Amino acid sequence: MDWGALLLSLKLSLVTVVILLPVSIVLGRILAYQKFYGKSIVQAILSLPLVLPPTVLGYYMLVFLGNDSIFNKLFGSPLIFNFSGLIIASIIFNLPFAIQPVQRAFEAIPRDIREAGACCGLTPLKVLWKIELPLSWRGIVSAMMLTFAHTIGEFGVVLMVGGNIPNETKTIAIAIAIAIYDKVQIFDNEAAAIMSMFLLVFSLIIISITYLITDNSNHKHE
């Protein structure tokens, strides 16, 4: 096990979750409640990482974060092939995983409950804090767990933007993918199976917990 790569992946996943938590709440709430011109286009753009091949998304990330980009001028140094660039790329390719479950959770809150809070004199911020967040927390937790798991397992975008620099951009997904490839090349199928099983079991656990939370939420609303 490449412990350095694992720790880097955990760090990247945690930073991504911390940043996307408030972003997903704000954007998810806007998309759930607000009607505005071009809303479908905005939702389509936010959903692009779900359908774009990782290499295509990674290529545009290279252009987006390259030497001539606004981010490069803002930070004063190239953002590709370093951890800061990985964070930006991770935030972008995780947007649909973070926003869509939160949006659905807000949409499931009955409108009359929110209006009752407003009629009782609660400000929009207090309605969010006292009514909407307590009723949508399962969707928010599910979104963050999916984001965390997706970041751990992402390979294509991370490799394109960060490369394979130990202790800087080499994540556990890259380390395992390379190790599996090497083991297959020398016909060590047992070792390749063990390493593949690690990510498989981890992903299955995260997805199972996510569905468990969602199912419990649905049963309580019935």
Image (cartoon, rainbow, N blue to C red):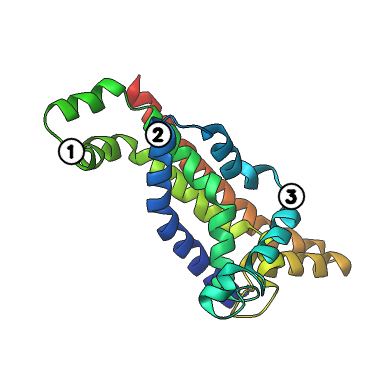
What is the spatial separation of the Cα atoms under label 3 and label 2, in whole angstroms? 28 Å
Q: Toward the viewer: 204 or 110?
A: 110
Quadrant the N terminus occupies: bottom right
Q: Is residue 190 visible?
A: yes
Quickly name the residue at label 1. Answer: 123
Where's residue 43, x and y in %? 55, 38
Q: Toward the viewer: 152 or 191?
A: 152
* Nearer-N-terminus badge (3/2): 3
- Give the label, 2 or 1, closer to the camera: 1
Q: Toward the viewer: 150 or 129?
A: 129
Q: Quadrant of residue 158?
A: bottom right
Residue 80 lies left or right of residue 43; in this view the side is right
What's the amino acid at mark 1?
Thr
Residue 76 lies left or right of residue 161; in this view the side is left
Quickly name the residue at label 2. Answer: 105
Where's residue 179, x and y in %? 75, 69
Marks 3 and 1 in Cβ contact (< 8 Å)? no
- Give the label, 3 or 1, closer to the camera: 1
Marks 3 and 2 in Cβ contact (< 8 Å)? no
Quickly name the residue at label 3. Answer: 53
Instruction: Decide: is 172 above or below 139.
Output: below
Q: Quadrant of residue 107?
A: top left
**What kind of element bears circle 3?**
loop
Residue at figure coordinates x 52%, y 72% from the top left? 7
Residue farthest front in this picture = 37
